[in-house]
Image: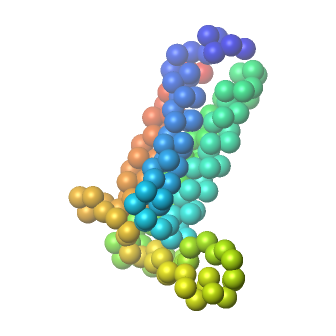
Amino acid sequence: MTSDTLPRSFRLARLLALIVPAAAMATALVAEYGFALAPCEMCWWQRYAHIAALVPAIEAFLVRDRQRVQMCVALAVLGIAASGLIGGFHAGVEYHWWQGLTSCSTTHLSGDPLAAILSAPVIRCDVPAWTLFGISMAGYNCIGSLSAAAVIAVLARRGR
């Protein structure tokens, strides 16, 4: 199966299923390493879901079977939506609408474990590291990921 045999809307869905989690991960990494915004534990959960979405999104470009391509896009949509839902939960914790499953975490440890533990900064899950217009990165992930998952699902459905 070539990409020409797939309907245009489905090809767009497949492309967005790859771009959205890749862009979300790039944004998270730029925030972390470019602007020193260390992720908390719930930030990592959102990243894990996007990474999980990337795997089938990449596979959707590598396989030839039409049903398998559709399944890969569907799995990517689920991963993107999962990240958005986690982001929504995390935003609620940051706004103190509810209590999180964990209140704090630390950054990765390397070298001497005891020294690393003692000197590691505590990254709180209930305090946003950054906001724009009162919305945290978790809030933007929720809005963006759930919206993107819906658009991708509609495009994929239209292209079936």
Classify 46 as above or below 24. Answer: below
Task: Identify the residue at horizontal 51%, vertical 32% (top origin).
Answer: 16
From the viewer's side, name the closer residue of 119 and 123: 119
For the C terminus, the quadrant is top right
- Between 112 and 158, the one lying in front of the other is 112
Q: Where is residue 68 drawn, in percent x and y?
A: 73, 29
The quarter of the picture where the N terminus appears is: top right
Q: Residue furthest left?
A: 133
**Location of residue 4 (image quadrant):** top right
Up the image or down, 53 lies above or below 63; here it is below
The residue located at (74%, 26%) in the rendering is: 63
Residue 87 point in image, percent of width and height: 46, 60
Asked whether residue 71 appears in the rendered view, the answer is: no
Residue at x 27%, y 58% (from the top left corner):
132
Q: Residue at x 54, y 42 (%)?
A: 22
Whole-percent x, y for residue 42 in the image: 53, 67
| Left or right of 93, for residue 114 | right
Residue 119 location in percent, x, y? 55, 85
Q: Determine whether 104 is above or below 46 in the image.
A: below
Residue in front for this viewpoint, 128 or 116: 116
